Image (cartoon, rainbow, N blue to C red):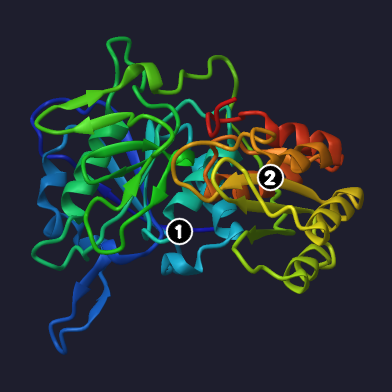
Amino acid sequence: MSYNKIHINPISPEPTVGSVLVIYTGGTLGMVYEAKDRQLVPFNFDQIIDRVPEIGRLNFDITFLSLTEPIDSSNMNPEIWIELATIIEQEYAAHDSFVILHGTDTMAYTASALGFLLENLNKPVILTGAQLPIGVARSDARENVITALELAAAKNELGQPIISEVCIYFNSLLLRGNRSKKRESSDFNAFHSENYPVLANAGVRIEYNFPYIQSQVQGLPLQVQKNIDNHVAFLKMFPGISPLVVNSLLNIKGLKGIVLETYGAGNATTAPWFLDAISDAIARNIIIFNVSQCDGGRVAQGHYETSRFLKQAGVVSGSDITAEAAITKMMYVFGKETDPKKCAEMLATPLRGEMSI
């Protein structure tokens, strides 16, 4: 597929120190007011220097690439995840790092998915966006974009990227992508990582939290997994959930896996009908992945009586994984492996630092 690219020549007198590819998918960040009727419309990235003049003062090469049809992030889907991963694969040798401009609503899903699809990644892939359009005076877009670019281009004393994983940068914080959740719809601090430390804090200086940054993968080429199986669903526990709802979901034709969002440390109702439904689904090789509804803490199956049966029945514990990472991991695993036993083992094992065991 052919994409429109725009190359930015930095005006810094210093020699350039690398190259960053910026991929624009759509979202709030790239909107400006149309002069005629003051409606928000996507802006032309040919005008990026006019909108964010600070970009021209950076001392690394920047190339902008826009998807053929930018989308609102609510329309994000697995096909676009594969498209993004394929772009990175095709441009991997030509660029030192990657920044993806993305709408905030599904950014944590995309960051999680790309973390799984990009196997043996040893370059930065940083997603960012904005709560206010770039055409608005108080927009957070400029700071988010500039700092995401600086983080993507940052190298250590050996000339290697400091970051070599998929991350989200937002409102001064760099977070592991598959540990992130959107928590605010109206404040600038939109994302948090409750179960994993912040990777960097961008204040007056950028302070890196080195012990928690993923180590580089040495000696292995990038491989992109291009099969995703979305025969999966969420089942969220709530007081009063009915047998009709649970059985209808667990009997969807072609269903391969369920992310079960349970209470607290992995607890669910012990009503006999529910236990029977779970046991029957597992007997039909439907994999059930237990994830807590709480942002913090982790699933500890068997710690309480109300989760003991789930463990005995063969429900897979998600430990402290986020729901976003759990559902995308399940799609990735089912696209890669067909044996239910091996799928369950992969789900229970940390693959990209997405969960602790």
Q: Can you see residue 253?
A: yes
Left or right position of 57 against 256: left
Mark 2 residue type: Thr
- Residue 96, percent from left and from top: 38, 30
Where is residue 185, by image quadrant? bottom left
Q: Residue at x 60, y 64 (%)?
A: 239
Mark 1 residue type: Thr
View extreme (bottom): residue: 37
- Residue 111, percent from left and from top: 47, 46
Q: Can you tell which of label 1 and label 2 is closer to the viewer?
A: 2
Question: Where's the C terminus, which quadrant?
Answer: top right
Where is residue 351, by image quadrant? top right
Report which residue position mark 2 lands on: 306
Q: Secondary structure at mark 2?
A: helix
Judge the density around disc 2: few (<14), some (14-19), many (≥20) Cα neighbours within 10 Å.
some
Q: Is residue 354 or residue 229 the one in the foreground?
A: 354
Q: Residue at x 43, y 27 (%)?
A: 164
Report which residue position mark 1 lands on: 106
Q: Is residue 302 or residue 225 the one in the foreground?
A: 302
Left or right position of 318 against 205: right
- Residue 163, percent from left and from top: 37, 26
Q: Residue at x 26, y 38 (%)?
A: 173
Q: Residue at x 40, y 61 (%)?
A: 105
* N-term mark: 1 or 2: 1
